[in-house]
Structures are given as C-alpha cells and as structure tokens.
Amino acid sequence: MSWGAYSGVMIATGLKFIAGPITGFSLGLTWYETVLFTWLGAMATVTIIITAGKAILGLVAKYRSSKPKLFSKRIRYAVDIWQRFGIKGIAALTPLIFTPIGGSLLALSFKVPTARILFFMGISSLIWALIYVAGIYQLTFLRDMLVH
C-alpha cells in the first residue's frame, strides 16, 4: 500500500479513533496494517497534544471569554472517572469517548506525568485498535458489496 493510505488511517484515528479502522478497511489495507497505523495515529496525536498541551491549555484559559462551568455533566463524568480509575480509566475510555485529543488534554488537566500518559494510552490504543479492527474486518461482505 501507499504511504497516503497509511497516513489517511493515522489522521482519521487522531480525530476520532474508530475512523482509523473504518478508513483502513475501506482502503483495503490488511488487518495488521490497519491495527499498526491506527495505533501509530493515536500515539502520534497523543504525543503531539501532550507536548503542546500546556501551551494549548494556557491559550484556552487566556482567551476564554467566561469562566468554565465547574460542575457541568461532562466535567462531573470526567472527575468521576478520574476518582475511580485514574489515568488507567481515562486511557481506557479515550478511544471510546474522549478521542485521542480529548483524552490527552483530560490527562494533562489532571497533571498526569507525560511518561504515564504515553504508557497507558499506548496500551489502551493497541487493545482498542485490535478490538475495532477485528470487529470491522468481520464485515468483509460489505467491502465486496461496495466494490462490485
């Protein structure tokens, strides 16, 4: 396959995790290529976000027109996950709920060290990539219908 297809999977994953496996499937990549580039896309996004994260959080705070709600439904949900499971819970739910961007910013907001974020996000991203790709690649009949 071409690097364009691989980068397409990585970019799609960075924006919304499940979009990577769907993109890999629709481009005809093998399942292991899709798992690898889904994982790489998630980890590249996490790395970029946590590297630039402090600056991003500072800019958001600086240019925010009003103070953020302290007790919105989303914030309560995030704090509840943090209190129950810590970084492991945030990492586990990032591919499902938060997206790699949101999960990374959430982990940064709880002041988790960079190495711990990368470690747990890496494990979670690999596990969820395997699960999503396995499920999506069971739908090979869809590709056959779309191609013919």
Image: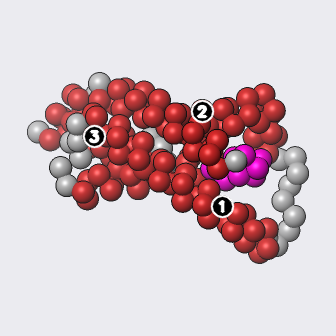
Q: CA distance from mark 1 to mark 2?
A: 20 Å
1 and 2 marks in contact (CB < 8 Å): no
Give the residue at the far front of this rendering. 115
- Residue 2 sits inside the magenta stretch: no
Q: Amino acid at mark 3?
A: Glu
Q: Nearer the viewer, mark 1 or mark 2?
A: 1
Mark closer to the chain start, 3 or 1? 3
Using residue 111 as the reference point, say whether residue 56 is left or right of it.
Answer: left
Q: Secondary structure at mark 2?
A: helix
Q: Secondary structure at mark 3?
A: helix
Q: Secondary structure at mark 1?
A: helix
Using residue 131 as the reference point, say whether residue 106 is left or right of it.
Answer: right
Q: Nearer the viewer, residue 91 or 140?
A: 91
3 and 2 marks in contact (CB < 8 Å): no
Q: CA distance from mark 3 to mark 2?
A: 22 Å
Q: Amino acid at mark 1?
A: Gly
Q: Which residues are magenta?
A: 104-112
Circle 3 sits on which residue?
A: 33
Q: Identify the residue shown where x is 66% and y is 32%.
A: 88
Q: Give the image quarter of residue 90.
A: top right
* Magenta: main secondary structure: helix
Q: Amino acid at mark 2?
A: Ala
Q: CA distance from mark 3 to mark 1?
A: 29 Å
The x, y position of residue 131, in whole percent, is 42, 27
The x, y position of residue 78, in whole percent, is 75, 40
- The circle on residue 27 is none
Against 120, residue 67 (above or below) is below
The crowd level at tag 3 (other Cα within 10 Å; few <14, some 14-19, many 20+) is some
